[in-house]
Amino acid sequence: MLATQVSADPRIKATVLFSGVPFLDRPVIASNVDPKTQLAQIHAPVLVLAGDAGHDILHQGSIDDMAYIKNAPLFMAWQDGLTHIGTYGMKNGGELTKLGWEWFAWQLRHEQKYAAIFQGADCALCKEGDGWHVERSMK
């Protein structure tokens, strides 16, 4: 939720949403801002990472978020068997933290070796045999 609250700022160049934005049906208490409005105002590339529908309580929320992000390129990936807690308890945050770091290295530092993970029909994450599923919307 915090990422969406600042992502409309023109200074923000990329966003990662881990396991979606909860409570799309009501305003964020602290700001009284509609989360749908915040998602619609995102203008820079977005990576959404989530667990699968049976293990991540915000899996559907992650999918729902995609409908409101209309003004930015969007890459969503979720993994079979991955929980809402993901890999964050692992050393250095595990694979999800690594993917977030690689997204920012590509988007913010323009390190093209990381673009291959997310870009193109044969992107590395698209081909992974580890139960990853990918949806993209390049606006």
Image (spheres, rainbow, N blue to C red):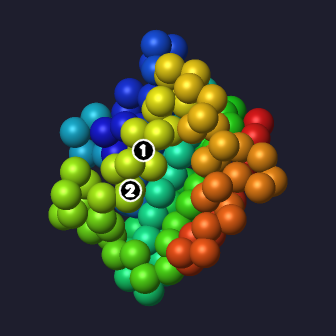
Q: Amino acid at mark 2?
A: Leu
Say few, some or many: other residues with alpha carbon within 10 Å of mark 1 (under 14 / 14 to 19 / 20 or more).
Answer: some
Apparent side of residue 51 relative to residue 111 in the rendered image (left or right): left
Locate the C terminus and report the quarter of the image it occupies.
top right
Query: Looking at the image, which residue is at 18% across and 63% down?
Result: 89
Q: Is residue 11 above or below residue 83?
A: above
| The furthest residue to the top | 11
Q: Nearer the viewer, residue 16 or 90?
A: 90
Q: Nearer the viewer, residue 98 or 48?
A: 98
Judging from the image, what secondary structure is the residue with disc 1 in? helix
| The furthest residue to the bottom | 54
On the image, the x and y values in percent for residue 121 come to 81, 53
For disc 2, the marked residue is 96
Q: Is residue 15 above or below residue 126?
A: above
Apparent side of residue 88 relative to residue 117 in the rendered image (left or right): left
| The furthest residue to the front | 113
For disc 1, the marked residue is 100
Determine contact: label 1, label 2, CB under 8 Å. yes
Res. 68 in view: no
Judging from the image, what secondary structure is the residue with disc 2 in? helix
Mark 1 to mark 2 CA distance (whole Å):
6 Å
Locate the N terminus and report the quarter of the image it occupies.
top left
Q: For residue 58, which quarter of the picture?
A: bottom left
Apparent side of residue 95 relative to residue 80 in the rendered image (left or right): left
Q: Amino acid at mark 1?
A: Gly
Query: Looking at the image, which residue is at 40% across and 39% down?
Result: 101
Say few, some or many: other residues with alpha carbon within 10 Å of mark 2 (under 14 / 14 to 19 / 20 or more).
Answer: some
Count of numbered marks: 2
Q: Nearer the viewer, residue 40 or 125?
A: 125
